[in-house]
Image (cartoon, coloured by chain):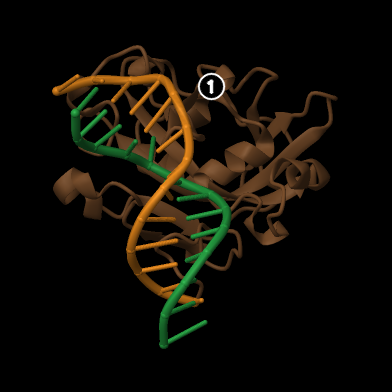
Chain colours: A brown, B orange, C green
DNA sequence: CGCAGGATGGGCT
DNA sequence: GCCCATCCTGCGG
């Protein structure tokens, strides 16, 4: 399976990109060169500068948010809560700060290494959250601004197309401060996936 | 199972 | 000095 082409990311509709990232495969090579990967099963769209929940709300442009003003197909990785990282994909043209947060994966390759990186955790929670998947794949700020067309982190086409009926949507998580924007249904997930994040979405 | 509380540090007002 | 696009543990039912 090949890497998703630049044109996948540079499209103007960040909601479409967020939906269509479901089923694709996020890959990060381990230090020994082996692959650690997972199928993307949950995403959220962030549409700055209008979107109050976006770090780029109001056109805010700082050293951290500068990444989002790059061209679609760039990794935006930042640090939160003093101990976690979040992996996002920049979309749209340069200077348009849109991005998609990857919230959960279904582990595919490198599961042994994921277990070492997530000691004491059951397999079911190796990558079922945005901070967890970064730990499992070894994603940190050194990957901020990485080009997804490069060889440090990338996304490959999944093996099967995802029918629309398998995709669910709802409000984004952890952005209650964002007023009306907090209720927009810009979170997308694969309905039947056991790996979708648990927080505020109790299993069945 | 659910929920409360703590950890922990960079980013920005 | 306050705010987080979170996770984990421990405790109660």
In the image, taking residue A68 as reference, residue A77 lies left or right, namely right
Where is residue A178, by image quadrant? Answer: top left
Residue A89: percent from left, percent from top: 48, 31
Is residue A52 among what the camera can see? yes
In the image, taking residue C5 as reference, residue A21 lies left or right, namely right
Where is residue A54, by image quadrant? Answer: top left
Label 1 crowd bin: few (<14), some (14–19), many (20+), radius 10 Å: some
Q: Disc 1 marks which residue?
A: A141
Chain bearing mark 1: A
Q: Quadrant of the N terminus of chain A?
A: top right
Residue A159: percent from left, percent from top: 71, 49
Where is residue A55, by image quadrant? Answer: top left
Q: Is residue A153 above or below residue A46?
A: above
Residue at 62% across, 44% down:
A24
Residue at 35% across, 31% down:
A12
Q: Is residue C4 above or below residue A147?
A: below
Residue at 42% across, 28% down:
A91
Quick one: SS at disc 1?
Answer: helix
Residue A34: percent from left, percent from top: 84, 31
Is residue A19 among what the camera can see? no
Residue at 41% across, 17% down:
A67
């Amino acid at each position: 399976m090949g890497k998703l082409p630049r044109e996948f990311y540079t499209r103007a509709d960040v909601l479409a990109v967020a939906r269509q990232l479901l089923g694709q495969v996020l890959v990060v090579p381990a230090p020994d060169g082996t692959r650690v990967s997972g199928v993307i099963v949950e995403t959220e769209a962030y549409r700055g500068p209008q979107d109050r929940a976006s770090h780029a709300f109001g056109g805010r442009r700082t050293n951290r948010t500068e990444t989002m003003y790059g061209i679609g197909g760039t990794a935006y990785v930042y640090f939160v809560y003093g101990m976690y990282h979040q992996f996002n994909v920049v979309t749209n043209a340069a200077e348009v700060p849109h991005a998609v947060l990857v919230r959960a994966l279904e582990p595919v390759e490198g599961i042994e290494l994921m277990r070492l990186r997530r000691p004491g955790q059951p397999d079911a929670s190796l990558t079922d959250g945005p901070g967890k998947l970064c730990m499992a794949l070894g994603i940190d700020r050194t990957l901020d601004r990485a080009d997804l067309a490069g060889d440090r982190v990338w996304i490959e086409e999944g093996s099967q197309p995802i029918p629309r009926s398998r995709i669910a949507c709802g409000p984004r998580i952890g952005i209650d401060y964002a007023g009306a924007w907090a209720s927009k249904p810009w979170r997308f997930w694969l309905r039947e996936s056991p790996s979708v994040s648990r927080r505020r979405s109790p299993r069945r």
